[in-house]
Each structure stands twice: as C-alpha cells, then as structure tokens.
Amino acid sequence: MSIVELRRYTLHPGARETLIELFEREFVSGQEAVGISVGGRFRDVDDPDRFVWLRAFPDMASRRRSLEAFYTGSVWREHRAAANATMIDSDDVLLLRGPGFTPAPGTREVVATVCHPTDAAAFDAYAVRHLGPERALHRTEHAENDYPLLPVHTGEEVRVWFGPPESPPPPWPTRRLRLEPVTAAARRAV
C-alpha cells in the first residue's frame, strides 16, 4: 500500500485543456523524476472546470522528500505561474492509503466513489461483500501532513474506490465522480 493523494482542482472557466496540456508535457515526467508515481489523470465529466488526478509515494517520509524536490526544482519553478493561472482552487486533496489507480488503456469513463462511513467495521463488511480488489479501495491516511505548503483535508474519515457504481449502494453518504481519463489520444487532440 502507498500514500496516495486524490487531488481535485477547480479551474478558471475554459482553462482545463490548457492545464492538461501543461501537466502532461511537463509535470508528469517532472514528478516522476523525483520519485513520485503519477497515477490517473481525469476530466470531471460533470464539471468542465475540474481536473482530478492521483499521485503516490511509498511512505510519508518519501512524500515529503519528493514534494520538496519537485516544488523547489526547475520544472515547477519554470511552469508554476502558467499552472497557477489556470486554477481557482488546488487544495481539495484527500490523503489516502491504498494501491493508487491508473485506468486500463482504452477506458472511456471511470467512476470514483468517495464514501464517508460512520462505522469502520460495517464498512469493512460491506467492502468484503461488494468491492473486489479491482476497485482499488483507499482509506484515509491519518498521518500528519508533513508538507504543509500543500494542504490536505483533515478530520474526516473517507473511503475511495474506482469502478462502475456498486450494487447495492453503500448506506453512508457518498459522492460519485464521473471521470474521463486523460489518454495519449486525447492529449494529441488538444
């Protein structure tokens, strides 16, 4: 299991494709060069001004070192103004523990379910019955955010998984995100 950030950005109207092009051209390889595993990157199907993505780290100490290296490095310094100009909010971040997630090639849409269970044992029983390993189940990571320059949500218990909507739906508050993967073909069409 890895430390995973699920990052949901709210962008200025019409800026999503600009950010995606910059992200794919500069930020994927720039982060991977400092030990960050960049996972799925998505357009929110229901909100044209949202970009959703995941990145993973082996542990919290690696997370801190990799984030420090990236955000003080040349790639971020050179392109941060352009990236930040597309964003209204980049602080909607869940810090999770899980396997990470990258959709299979050719996947056209993914559903991410964000669930707020009130009973961990009851959720675990639900997960055993309804969520197989292909769902890439993630849980809140309660470690202190040791890179405070990038805020994360605290004080909430969440479970996040990927795949088609499950049946029956969980009996706890959930939010489903319909996501279109950013693919090589889609990047070329931009």
Image (cartoon, helix red, strand yellow):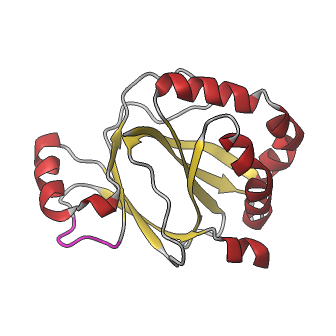
How far across and down, in percent of the image, does residue 115 sit? 31, 53
Question: Would you say 187 lies left or right of 103 here?
Answer: right
Task: Specify whether 179 is left or right of 26.
Answer: left
Q: How many marks?
A: 0
Quadrant assignment, res 75: top right
Is 18 covered by the magenta stretch? no
166 drawn magenta: yes
Q: Position of residue 76 (x, y in %)?
A: 80, 38
Image quarter for residue 139? top left
Residue 69 higher or lower than 133, as above or below: above
Q: Is residue 99 left or right of residue 51?
A: left
**In the rendered image, the vertical position of residue 124 relative to residue 152, given as above or below:** below
Residue 20 in sight from this viewpoint: yes
Q: Residue at x 45, y 56 (%)?
A: 101
Residue 110, position in %: x, y? 45, 70
The residue located at (18%, 55%) in the rendering is: 127
Q: Between residue 176 and residue 96, name the one nearer to us.
A: 96
For the N terminus, the quadrant is top left
Q: Which residues are magenta?
A: 164-169
The relative height of residue 79 versus residue 17 in the rendered view (above or below) is: above
Residue at image position (49%, 66%) is: 103
Magenta stretch, main secondary structure class: loop
The quadrant in which the C terminus is found is bottom right
Does residue 145 appear anywhere in the picture? no
**Residue beneath the point at 31% across and 58% down:** 174
Provide residue 54's location: percent of width, then percent of height: 54, 50
